[in-house]
Image (cartoon, grey):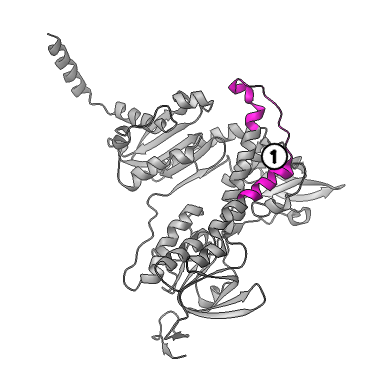
């Protein structure tokens, strides 16, 4: 192979850059970021190889978004049966054949799986290799194939999209008693005829809250342990308080300001030791789920040997490029967010910059990032929270509408929660929005669109919303803002004008 030398001192100068490449792009990891990157490259008629050592679809399809939402749905139906008297029906205690619940979850995964399959991406023009990829130099990737073979490919660009995995804290005895994570519970609990009787959930973030509530609704005695002063520390306190109250209403024993210090067994009975206010006590359990966060998968891909900095995430610039402009990162490994939709969003920038960066580069845009926690009630947010605005000393006004006053929510028996919008003082420009309530994640889309395209609350107020729908809450909060900003002098003139018209 003919080659050319890099300029001395440039990144990769110690390696020989090929004159010709086997591929335009190699993508490592077939989760959301990797799939979107490969799709874009194939659409741009690039020769692209996608490498995945495990399951196509990554964490979201196999361990995260899809199975957890299927679990949440089953748990919600059980909850509605238990409280059917709220709707004028006879309440019944649901029978929960847990193995059937788990089989439904795997059926849901199976129905969505073809969207992310090897066959689909092969048809799209992507070469898919099942194996473990490692960078040998900035342009060479070695793939240890799952069937035992080995392959080396040169490529003009590489995108690292290896995702994240559950972080497991170093709690003494935890490994000995055995633990579940949001990745492993779907297989480990599959086939169990009954839901775990006593369940401990470590962590009070979105994953911990979703799992704690779901298992409680399915019949587990759930104890949720969180070291922080409250649940869901990334959200405003009023939003987190509604979720905590709902979890407690479902029977979850919420222990905030409690630190897990040790695990062990006593006569075959598993226990967790927690510390609170300098006192220590033990909690017995049958299963424990560790849900204290996720850490990017960074080891074993050859990044350190190339001098690419990896700390909490892969160090990239605003174009998602690493130390080597032809090696980019997207998704959980790149940060700053760990959301499937953000991974797909980043993938567009990574793929375009990888393929066309010599001609035109695009900065990754994080100006409007929405997210949701799918507890009941849901919590959805975009832009600044009230707490963040105060902390960053951003001038703002807060407008709030209580969903308990919304006709459709009252009819549905879901009249709890609120819509809260932060705006520039005296103006309707939206700085952030938080929705707590039924289908909050869906309702937030209107605010995401408005912020992305520079529309204010006035535009939302001037848009017809179907009656009766939950989406009217968005218009109601815009109306609240308008009423708070009516010009008093103009109103008095209007009153005098109307009086004059009467004669």
| Disc 1: CA contacts within 10 A as few (<14), some (14-19) or many (>=20) | many
Q: Residue at x 76, y 41 (%)?
A: 194
Image quadrant assignment for residue 197: top right
Q: Which residues lie in the magenta part? A: 79-108
**Relative depth, front residue between 191 and 233:** 191
Quadrant into which the C terminus falls? top left
Residue 458 vs residue 182: left or right?
Answer: left
Q: Nearer the viewer, residue 60 or 15?
A: 60
Instruction: Identify whether 66 is placed above or below 355.
Output: above
Give the side of residue 155 with respect to residue 106, left or right.
left
- Is residue 432 in view? no
Residue reaching furthest right? 267
Q: Residue at x 29, y 37 (%)?
A: 459
Look at 34% across and 48% down and name the residue there.
452
Q: Residue furthest top?
A: 503
**Residue position for label 1:** 223
């Amino acid at each position: 192979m003919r080659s050319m030398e890099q300029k001395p001192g440039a990144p990769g100068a110690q390696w020989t850059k090929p004159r010709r490449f086997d591929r335009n792009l190699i993508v490592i990891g077939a989760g959301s970021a990797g799939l979107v990157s490969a799709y874009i490259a194939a659409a741009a008629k690039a020769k692209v190889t996608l490498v995945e050592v495990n399951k196509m679809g990554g964490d979201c399809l196999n361990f995260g978004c899809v199975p957890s939402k299927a679990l949440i749905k089953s748990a919600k139906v059980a909850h509605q049966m238990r409280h059917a008297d709220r709707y004028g029906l006879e309440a019944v205690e649901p029978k929960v054949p847990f193995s059937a619940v788990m089989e439904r979850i795997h059926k849901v995964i199976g129905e969505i799986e073809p969207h992310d399959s090897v066959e689909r991406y092969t048809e799209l023009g992507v070469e898919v290799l099942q194996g473990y990829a490692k960078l040998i130099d900035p342009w060479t990737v070695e793939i240890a194939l799952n069937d035992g073979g080995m392959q080396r490919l040169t490529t003009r660009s590489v995108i690292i999209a290896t995702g994240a995995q559950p972080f497991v804290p170093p709690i003494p005895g935890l490994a000995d008693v055995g633990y579940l994570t949001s990745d492993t519970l779907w297989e480990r609990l599959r086939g169990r005829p009954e839901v775990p009787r006593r369940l401990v959930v470590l962590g009070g973030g979105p994953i911990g809250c979703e799992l704690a509530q779901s298992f409680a609704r399915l019949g587990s005695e759930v104890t949720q342990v969180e070291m922080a002063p409250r649940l869901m520390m990334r959200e405003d306190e009023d939003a987190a308080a509604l979720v905590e109250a709902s979890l407690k209403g479902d029977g979850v024993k919420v222990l905030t300001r409690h630190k897990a210090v040790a695990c062990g067994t006593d006569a075959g009975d598993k226990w967790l030791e927690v510390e609170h206010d300098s006192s220590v006590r033990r909690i017995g359990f049958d299963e424990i789920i560790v849900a204290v966060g996720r850490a990017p998968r960074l080891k074993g891909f050859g990044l350190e040997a190339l001098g690419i900095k990896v700390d909490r995430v892969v160090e990239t610039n605003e174009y998602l490029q690493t130390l080597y402009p032809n090696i980019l990162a997207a998704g959980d490994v790149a940060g700053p967010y760990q959301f499937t939709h953000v991974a797909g969003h980043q993938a567009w920038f990574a793929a375009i910059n990888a393929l066309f960066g010599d001609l035109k580069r695009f900065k990754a845009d994080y100006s409007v990032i929405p997210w949701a926690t799918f507890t009941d009630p849901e919590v959805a947010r975009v832009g600044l929270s009230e707490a963040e605005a105060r902390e960053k000393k951003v001038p703002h006004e807060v407008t709030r509408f209580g969903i308990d006053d919304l006709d459709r929510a009252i009819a549905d028996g879901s009249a709890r929660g609120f819509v809260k919008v932060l705006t520039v003082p005296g103006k309707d420009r939206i700085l952030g929005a938080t929705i707590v309530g039924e289908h909050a994640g869906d309702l937030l889309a209107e605010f995401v669109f408005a912020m992305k395209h520079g529309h204010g609350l006035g535009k939302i107020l001037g848009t017809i919303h179907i009656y009766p729908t939950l989406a009217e809450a968005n218009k109601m909060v815009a109306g609240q803002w308008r009423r708070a900003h009516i010009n008093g002098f103009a109103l008095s003139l209007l009153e005098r004008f109307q009086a004059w018209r009467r004669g």
